[in-house]
Structures are given as structure tokens and as C-alpha cells.
Amino acid sequence: MTAQHHDGAAPVQGRDASGPARENRRTRMPLLDLLRGVAIVGTLATNVWLFTAPGGETAALFGGSGSVPMGRFLEDPSASSLFEGLFRTAANGTFLSLLTLMFGVGLALQYRSARDHGRRWPGTYKWRALFLFVEGTVHFTLVFAFDVLMGYAVVALLVAWLLVRSERVQAWVMWASLAVHMALMSLATAVTVMLPSHDAEHGVPADVAELYASGTYLEQVVFRLEHALILRAEPIGTFALMVFMFLLGVRLFRAGAFGDDTTGRRLRSRLLRWGLGAGVPLSLAAALGGEEWALADRYMAAPLVALGVIGLVGALLDRFGGAGPTATGLSALGRMAMTGYVAQNVLLMLVSYGFGLGLTERMAWAGPWWSLALWAAVSVLLAAGSVLWLRRFRHGPLEALQKKVLARAR
């Protein structure tokens, strides 16, 4: 890529800036599909606790131990609460960060394809981002209050514009975004830690709990729309983090971190050591710190752990290959990740809420074990369903719809 600036409609020309990634230009990278699949079942491991809590998806808004991964263990130490706490701590924010980074990698792939075929950039990519935003809006309204696709669409437009700027500009924006995010999260954490403690009871209001336990589907949709601003607070508050993770995904892709070669393995080994070696202790410390440290856990330590997950998954793929049933299922899910992300939330909604099977209320006696069983069951269903679907079709349902819509836009 040349260092000169281009306008948004300029053709992508000039030197290849992707470095070692060139060698994989004509082949699909197995690790990328596998990582996307891991990110989908990982976000499911976070979301399942929202769907199976009183008040459903809104439970995280009302504080208390229900919004803190180790909260139940801190209040009532037991084997079950310890297992739940460790499971939720491992998933909390980690796979959201991984999914965000993988969207950045996908953007880098789209840019490379446009450049290789002499297409203008961003060019028609804006229609892809618009489709993602519309899909996210529908997903938020009809299914899940904590949709990530709307935020990704906005960030994707910004990063797409940055990809035809100089590498110096991209690096400056990436590190400036990280600095802004860390400053905001540090300030917010400091405020919550220093505020005087209070004895007010936390918990979901009775009317909200009743809405998700026995309310109608339409009533829940109206509730999301009426509280849209607060329910959209996460993507607004973490916008700088998403910009950083997108650009980091681009940077890792261009450096060859996902390639099946010596360079890729060396970079993934570093990610494994630093990501898990530093990220896991920090995440555990923040989780054990209680509700005051929730932001530090989810938005500061978890992104570091996500980098370690890339290294770990890469090491496992190098060691065992991708032919086993687990890797095959996760890779298939990764190839239709957009469908998998929406489908998991649709399934959880229908299983958990009162207008569906209402298992959140009916299975409350089983404690955390039924949530874990639900996560495992939906994960297996998604992976197996993806394998079967791709045996007959080339793309997942939403991926195929996207291609059809974008073909008309072009």
C-alpha cells in the first residue's frame, strides 16, 4: 500500500501491504474458520447466562452477583459456584473480543480481494456494512438486546476507510484507540472502586422478571425499543476498543499470524505465552475483586486473554490437525458464523423465555448446571447443523442472503 491518501472511491492499487499473508492468497486458511467457530460457541457461553437468569437479557443491567462471573462463589463458596464462576470468567468478554478481532481479519480479507481484482475501495463494501447494520438492528429488535452486529457495521466503515491510508496512520489510530479505551475503563473502574459502599439490594425488578417469565413476545420487543439507549450502551462505550481490535486483526493477518508456516506458528506462540500468561491472572484477579472490577475484567483483561486463545487454538490445530469431529464441527460453524451467531440467540430465546418453553423459570431448581447443559446442547446442535448444511449448500442461510443482496447492490 502506498503512503499517499486516497478518497473513499479510489481504486486499490500499489504495493502489497499484507506481507507474509501473500502466500495464502489463493487458499482458505483453516485456522480462521476454526477461530470463528470457537468465537461463536464462546459468545454462546456468555449469552446463555443472560437468557437463563431472571429478567433474561436485561439481568446484566441491574448489578449484583448475577452480573459478576465469580459473584455467586464469593457469596456462597461451593463446588458448583466455583465451577460456574471459572466457566463464566473464562468466557466473559474473551470471545466477544475474539469475535471482534475476527471481524477485523474478515475486513482485511475483503480489502485484499478488492485489491487483487482491481476493484475500488471501499467501493461496494459500504453496502456490506449497511447490510450488517440492518441485520443487527433486526436482531436487536426481534431477538437479543446485546447484539454486536450494529456496532461492528459502524466500526467496519471507519476501518475500511483507514485501510487505504498509510500504515503510519493506521498504527496511530490503533494505538490511540487503545489508549482512549484504557483511560476510560481505568477511570470508570476507579470511580466504582472509590465510591462508598451501600446496602441497597441489587436485582432485577419484579415487573421485568415477570415480563421475561410470562410476558408475550411482542411485549419483550416493545421493552427493547423503549430502553434501546441503555441497551445499546455497550457498543457505544467500547467503540474505541472495537476500533483497536479490528485494526489489530488487520495487523495480525498482514503479519502472517494465521498462516500454516513458520512465521504463523512463531507469532501464535507469542500470543499464547503473553495472552494466557498475563491475561488469565489479570482476569481472575479482577473477577475475584467483585462487582467494582467488572469493567476491568470484561473490557481490559479479556481482550488480552483472547489473543492467548488464538495461540492456543493454533497450537491445538498444529498438534492434532483439523480432521476430528470437534474441529470439523467448529470449522463448519465458522464458515457460517453470521448464521450461527443469530441462530444461537434465537434458540436460547425460544427455550428460555415464557412465550417459548419457559425453561428459565421451570429449571431454576437445577442451579447453574442446566445453563451449562443448555450451552453444550446448543453448541453441539449448531456445529452438527453447520456440517450438515454445508454438505448441501455452499453458504449459510444469512451468508447466502447477504451475497444475494450485495450482488443486486453491485
Image: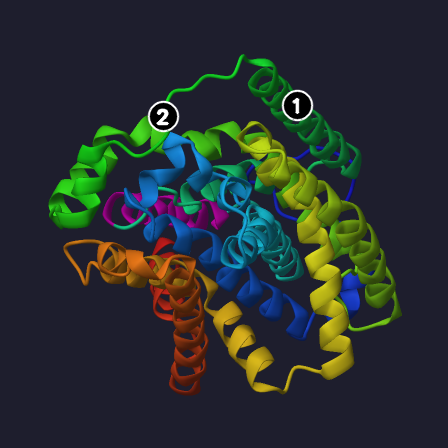
The boundaries of the magenta stretch are 124-142
Q: Main secondary structure of the magenta part?
A: helix
Crowding around mark 1 (Cα neighbors within 10 Å: few <14, some 14 to 19, many 20+) is some
Spot occupied by residue 380 in the image (x, y as percentages of width and height): 44, 76
Q: Is residue 173 left or right of residue 124?
A: right
Spot occupied by residue 38 in the image (x, y as percentages of width and height): 57, 65
Of 147 and 76, nearer the camera is 76
Quadrant where the C terminus sits is bottom left
Spot occupied by residue 40 in the image (x, y as percentages of width and height): 50, 61
Q: Where is 92 relative to 177, above or below?
A: below
Residue 202 on the magenta span: no
Sequence-first disc among 1 and 2: 1
State the SS at label 1: helix
Of 244 and 64, nearer the camera is 64
Marks 1 and 2, how far apart at CA = 26 Å
Image quadrant where residue 359 sits: bottom left
Residue 304 visible in the snapshot: yes
Residue at the spot of label 1: 186
Q: Residue at the spot x=71%, y=52% of the render?
A: 307
Of 154 and 118, nearer the camera is 154
Of 238 and 119, nearer the camera is 238
Q: Which mark is residue 201?
A: 2
Crowding around mark 2 (Cα neighbors within 10 Å: few <14, some 14 to 19, many 20+) is few
